[in-house]
Image: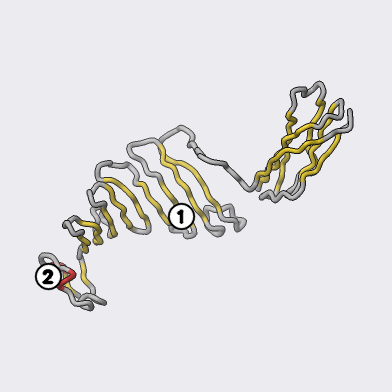
Amino acid sequence: MIPAEHITGLILGSQLAADAIDGKVITGSVVRSLRGNGSVAAVMAPDLGNGEAGFQTTSEDGTTYARLQSGEMTFGSTTVDQVLPTGIRGTAQGGTLDIMSGLISGGSQAHIILASGDSPVASGDGAPAIVMEWDGAGTADMVVDVSGVLMPRNFAWGKVSITPVANTPTPMTVTGLNVRGSNFTGFATVQSTVPGTVVTGVGVTAVSKTSITVWVTRTNTTATTVAWEVRGDK
């Protein structure tokens, strides 16, 4: 063992043989990786300034960093003092990864939590979970803005054209669905400019994981477009 107080100055890689420190224990040391211009690119130390050992990389201009400590990776800036750090954390229970937005000065922070089926965060039926939530002092509801097409697999939707028998409820069954979930609810609405007068009724029956039956009633035999949806719940 080589105590740190016995080493003064810098030890450069060019001054070490390949096996000089292999398998050796050096206590209390700080290991720095320098760029060609002399700036510190990375540091591994028993105390990164908050009492914990860790590893930190820093941008060349010194304004941003990434830090790994105690199973948590955090990201920050030397020019912004955050109340809570932005980061990624694996929980002590295992099987759970928490992605945290952090807080600059107040309000609430957002979390995206990925949990395995046997994680304490999951529902307990063996299914993995992705949870989006927020915490903190803020009271406003969290906003989830999807800049694209949301395609949840526990939903199915579409349109059918039904040519009814006049004044008679006329069905059409949609098959080939694969809706995720255990309990299923169906909805339908007619696309018409004469609802309640010519189109006198619309409904659904036999809603399941794989199919839905859509009904329409109207006073004549004009083909009628009905939009339908199936939703699956736990």
Q: Quadrant of the N terminus?
A: bottom left
Above or below, 121 relative to 196 = below
**Numbered mark located on residue 20 in the image:** none
Query: In this rendering, would 203 be left or right of 23?
Result: right
Residue located farthest toward the top when viewing the structure as drawn:
197
Q: Secondary structure at mark 2?
A: helix
Q: Secondary structure at mark 1?
A: strand
The amino acid beneath tag 2 is His
Give percent across and percent down for residue 82: 31, 42
Give percent across and percent down for residue 48: 24, 56
Give percent across and percent down for residue 5: 13, 67
In this rendered view, identify the residue nearer to me: 72 or 169: 169
In front of the other: label 2 or label 1?
A: 1
Instruction: Name the residue: 25% across, 61% down.
Output: 44
Please report whichever mark, 2 or 1, sits nearer to the chain's N-terminal start.
2
Give percent across and percent down for residue 149: 57, 41
Q: How many marks?
A: 2
The amino acid beneath tag 1 is Leu
Q: How was the colour assigned to the protein in this rendering? A: secondary structure
Instruction: Name the residue: 28% across, 56% down.
Output: 57
Q: Residues within 10 Å of mark 1 (few under 14, many from 20)?
A: some
Above or below, 24 relative to 137 = below
Q: CA distance from mark 2 to mark 1?
A: 41 Å
Q: Residues within 10 Å of mark 2 (few under 14, many from 20)?
A: few
Query: In this rendering, would 202 be left or right of 154?
Result: right
Instruction: Name the residue: 48% across, 50% down.
Output: 113
Which residue was labeled with disc 1? 97
**Numbered mark located on residue 6 in the image:** 2
Where residue 171 sits, quadrant-wise, is: top right
Instruction: Name the residue: 36% across, 36% down.
Output: 106
